[in-house]
Amino acid sequence: MSDFKSFVVAGAGHLGVFVIQELVKLKKAGKITSVVVFTRSNDSHEKILQLGAKPININYQNADQLAHALKGVDCFISTLTVSAIQFEKEIARACKAVDVRLFVPSEFGLPKVDHVGSKKDEVKKYIKEIKQPYAVFYTGAFTDMIFTPYAGFNWDEGKVSIGGSGDQPLSCTARPDIARYMAYVLTELPADDLENKIFCIEGERISFNAVCSGWEARTGRTLQITRIPRSVLEKEPPTNFGAHLLVEIDKGNGTVGPPEEINLYYPEWRPKKVLEVLLD
Ligand SMILES: NC(=O)c1ccc[n+]([C@@H]2O[C@H](COP(=O)([O-])OP(=O)(O)OC[C@H]3O[C@@H](n4cnc5c(N)ncnc54)[C@H](OP(=O)(O)O)[C@@H]3O)[C@@H](O)[C@H]2O)c1
């Protein structure tokens, strides 16, 4: 066991709320003692309190405030939004100064795919330089966010848009499963086994075409599928992350790693497969 007792999560957003929920469960079970959530303002307080955690307002550019808030903390987890990742350098510096034992940067995607202008790689380089112990989690696409009308999957209307061939594999993990996996390994693995480790996880490795044919088989309905060729997606500006992601998946960069290197540290983890998330 890591003996990490005191956790801070930064950002109660799309992913953060699930991570906070899992940590609060561990607190209620007496396994950990504290779940604090950093937020920029009072606006998020009610949500954080309802989750059962303690909100603390932070100005991420205030080094003294960060160091004070991180004192005595064992593990810091960032679930900050992509455009706020640059603040992780300031946070990591504060973690190092007050001996936070583990820093989890906001990754939670694919090792070879990132937003244009993202600071994720810069932050990882920095935490290594300052020798702040870290753990990184690659999760693939969030099943419960990608297979939605927003990303071209309108199941209710039976209309789906697939970028590229649709045959390449994609690592997919639902947010509750990501949170459960993280909370488990961060508390159950020895601290030495967590330090400077990369965790690659996936609920399922599956192609868009296989998801669609599985959905048709399960529902007995026929999907109206529109296909966008990779050559069309490649003409989109780099700021169009959705198009960029589809191109990278189509190039074979949609998985978190070789099958033998994934889901290694939580044998009882039973993540949901894509069709379970969509249909059950
Ligand atoms: N693999 C996937 O499919 C997938 C999908 C979505 C996201 N992700 C990744 O998951 C991570 C978390 O993303 P998310 O969508 O959960 O984030 P999010 O909900 O957009 O934002 C999380 C929190 O960040 C804080 N925040 C927002 N703007 C900020 C700013 N300018 N400065 C400081 N803090 C700010 C907010 O907290 P307060 O307002 O309380 O301060 C917000 O609740 C990211 O690394 C993202 O790339 C992956």
Image (cartoon, rainbow, N blue to C red):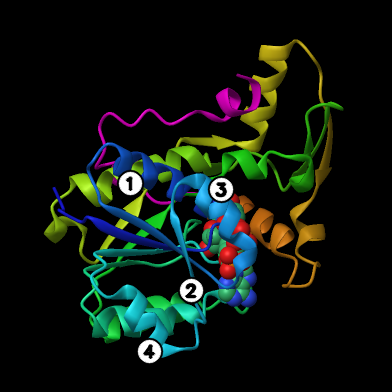
Badge 2 density bin: few <14, some 14–19, many ≥20, Cα 10 Å: many
Horizontal side of residue 83 vs 11, given as left or right: right
**Mark closer to the chain start, 3 or 1:** 3
Q: In this picture, which residue range is highlighted in magenta?
A: 255-280
Residue type, label 4: Asp
The residue tagged 1 is: 183
The residue tagged 4 is: 64
**Mark closer to the chain start, 3 or 2:** 2
The residue tagged 3 is: 141
Residue type, label 1: Ala
Q: Is 28 colored magenta in this rendering?
A: no
Q: Is residue 93 above or below residue 264?
A: below
Numbered disc 2: secondary structure: helix
Would you identify the image quadrant in which residue 211 lies?
top right
Seen from the viewer's position, the closer of residues 186 and 44 is 44
Badge 4 density bin: few <14, some 14–19, many ≥20, Cα 10 Å: few
**Mark closer to the chain start, 1 or 4:** 4
Residue 5 in picture, x, y percent from top left? 22, 55
Q: Quadrant of ligand 1?
A: bottom right
Q: Nearer the viewer, mark 1 or mark 4?
A: 4
The residue tagged 2 is: 120
**Mark closer to the chain start, 4 or 2:** 4
